[in-house]
Image: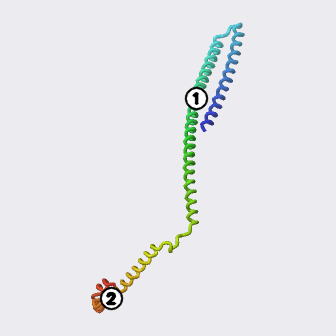
């Protein structure tokens, strides 16, 4: 928005200059008219009051002209400051745009790399989908190992059942069941009454 501020300020400055020029032209016409009257009055001899009035009027016009010139000078300085600020803002925005363009180019390059990796993975996935799954018979060593592990599991379950049966049939456990104070011992053996 700095450009609109500068434009608005430039418009206000031009308007002020136009007003000053209009006022100066009006004062000059008044001064010329007063001088013409003075010239006519000289023939008649001007009074000191008329001369004092004309001098006061001339001094007032000079004071106004000076004030208007100072206002124009102040506005010119303000205008130059705004223009410098707008120029700085423009350079800053250009730098930001260049930085964003650079980031965009980097993101596009990275996106391209990721796209190629994704395509390679998709091809690999499609290739894997086309291959048939290896059959269990194709790996006899693994099948044999699996059978051995299953046999060991069954054997361990059988041993566990035998040990539980032996515990249930043991004399100590039968004695513990018959004595009510030994309930805590029965809990240790895992027997249920």
Where residue 32 appears, as percent x and y from the top left, is 70, 15
Where does the N terminus fall, quadrant-wise? Answer: top right
Look at 68% across and 18% down and name the residue there: 28
Question: Mark 1, residues whose alpha carbon is within 10 Å: few (<14), some, or many (≥20)?
Answer: few
Dot 1: element:
helix
Q: Is residue 169 left or right of residue 87?
A: left
Query: Which quarter of the picture shows residue 74?
Result: top right
Disc number for residue 80? 1
Coloured how? Answer: rainbow
Look at 61% across and 22% down and name the residue there: 64
> Closest to the observer: 137 or 3?
137
Dot 2: element:
helix
Where residue 52 appears, as percent x and y from the top left, is 62, 14
> Closest to the observer: 51 or 1?
1
Look at 65% across and 28% down and name the residue there: 14
Disc number for residue 176? none
Where residue 2 appears, as percent x and y from the top left, is 60, 36
Where residue 47 appears, as percent x and y from the top left, is 66, 10
> Closest to the observer: 193 or 181?
193
- State whether residue 180 appears in this view: no
- CA distance for labels 1 and 2: 107 Å
Look at 50% across and 72% down and name the residue there: 138
- In the picture of the structure, the residue carrying the numbered disc 2 is 166
Residue 116 vertical placement versus 8 (above, below)? below
Query: Foreground mark, 1 or 2?
Result: 2
Residue 103 vertical placement versus 28 (above, below)? below
How many marks are shown on the rendered structure? 2
């Amino acid at each position: 928005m700095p450009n609109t501020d500068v434009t608005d300020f430039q418009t206000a400055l031009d308007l002020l200059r136009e007003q000053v020029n209009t006022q100066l032209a009006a004062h000059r016409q008044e001064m010329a008219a007063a001088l013409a009257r003075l010239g006519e009055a000289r023939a008649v001899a001007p009074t000191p009051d008329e001369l004092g009035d004309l001098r006061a009027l001339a001094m007032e016009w000079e004071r106004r002209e000076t004030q208007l010139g100072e206002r124009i000078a102040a506005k010119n300085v303000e205008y130059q400051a705004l223009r410098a600020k707008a120029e700085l803002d423009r350079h800053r925005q250009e730098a930001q745009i260049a930085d964003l363009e650079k980031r965009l180019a980097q993101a596009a390059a990275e996106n391209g790399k990721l796209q190629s990796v994704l395509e390679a993975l998709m091809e690999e996935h499609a290739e894997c989908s086309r291959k048939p799954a290896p059959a269990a018979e194709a790996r006899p060593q693994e099948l044999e190992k699996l059978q051995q592990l299953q046999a060991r599991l069954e054997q361990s379950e059988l041993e566990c059942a035998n040990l539980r049966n032996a515990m249930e049939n043991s004399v100590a456990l039968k004695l513990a069941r018959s004595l009510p104070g030994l309930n805590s011992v029965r809990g240790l053996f895992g027997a249920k009454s």
